[in-house]
Image: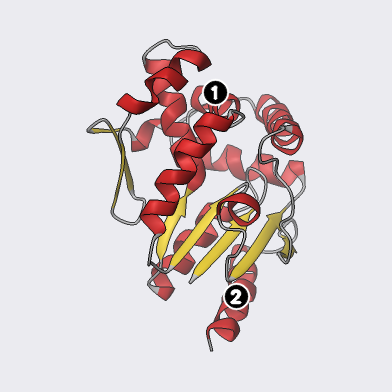
Amino acid sequence: MIITIDGPAGAGKSTLAKKLAKELNFIFINSGALYRALAYYLIENNLNLESLISNLPNIKIEIKGNFEKIYLNGKDITESLYTPEVSKKASLVAQNENIRNFVNDIIRKFSKDKNVIIEGRDTGSVIFPNADIKFYLDASVEVRAQRRYKDLKNKGIEIDFETLKKEIEKRDFEDKNRKIAPLIIPKDAIYIDTSFLSFEEVYKKVKEIIKNKMS
């Protein structure tokens, strides 16, 4: 079974998908982490986008555990994937068709013959358009910025709140207006606005929908 969860940055996709995957004994996939890994590679090697594309045959991304660890050419880069610098470059990287095809190929091969919960921005519209269940999580920019700010603070990353909010607004615009696989509400997706819902309320609602479908 394939379950997709799409939505903008900070809507709560990752936390929800991880918990659901653990309880339902599904494989968890964070598609955005793969774009972040490529953004990290670009930054570390001081490359432009064209050079990154040329280097794709030399890049090996490995997923360990339930997406708990991401290895890039043998190096554990998990803790480096969520810095503001990597976030900015990930948005640029994700706009390229060659790179999206590279990432989608990794995801589809990894998911073959597995029960999977995948979260991202085009998981139900492009990667798995025939998924068994599709969700689209949303929330106001203010709420999403507050959530991301708290997460970064907990990771020891200092950033100005207003700067973070503007970055999220910019990312939203880029994701929704890119020519390749823009962020949309997938056909047949169940839309959930999480702005005024606790995590437990969202989790209970989504879990109930999945359980009903599985039965």
As drawn, the label of residue 23 is: none
Label 2 packing within 10 angstroms: few (<14), some (14-19), many (20+): few
Looking at the picture, tell me which residue is in the foreground, 191 or 145: 191
Query: Considering the numbered disc 1 on the image, is that residue within a helix, a strand or a loop?
Result: helix
Left or right: 201 with respect to 16?
Answer: right
Q: Earlier in the sequence, mark 1 or mark 2?
A: 1
The residue carrying mark 1 is 89
Query: Considering the numbered disc 2 on the image, is that residue within a helix, a strand or a loop?
Result: helix
Above or below, 130 relative to 92 = below
Residue visible at 47% across and 49% down in the picture: 30
Q: Position of residue 123 (x, y in %)?
A: 58, 53
Residue visible at 54% across and 61% down in the picture: 16
As drawn, the label of residue 204 is: 2
Mark yes or no: residue 154 visible.
no
Q: CA–CA distance between discs 1 and 2? A: 34 Å
Label 1 packing within 10 angstroms: few (<14), some (14-19), many (20+): some
Q: Which amino acid is tagged 2?
A: Lys
Q: Position of residue 90 (x, y in %)?
A: 54, 29
The C terminus appears in which quarter of the rendering?
A: bottom right
Residue visible at 54% across and 26% down in the picture: 93
Mark 1 and mark 2 in contact? Answer it, CB < 8 Å.
no
Looking at the picture, tell me which residue is in the foreground, 25 or 55: 55
What residue occupies the far bottom of the structure in this picture? 215
Q: Which amino acid is tagged 1?
A: Lys
Left or right: 79 with respect to 91?
Answer: left
Q: Nearer the viewer, mark 1 or mark 2?
A: 1
Mark yes or no: residue 140 visible.
yes
Q: Position of residue 145 (x, y in %)?
A: 67, 39
Residue visible at 77% across and 47% down in the picture: 140
Q: Position of residue 51 (x, y in %)?
A: 45, 13
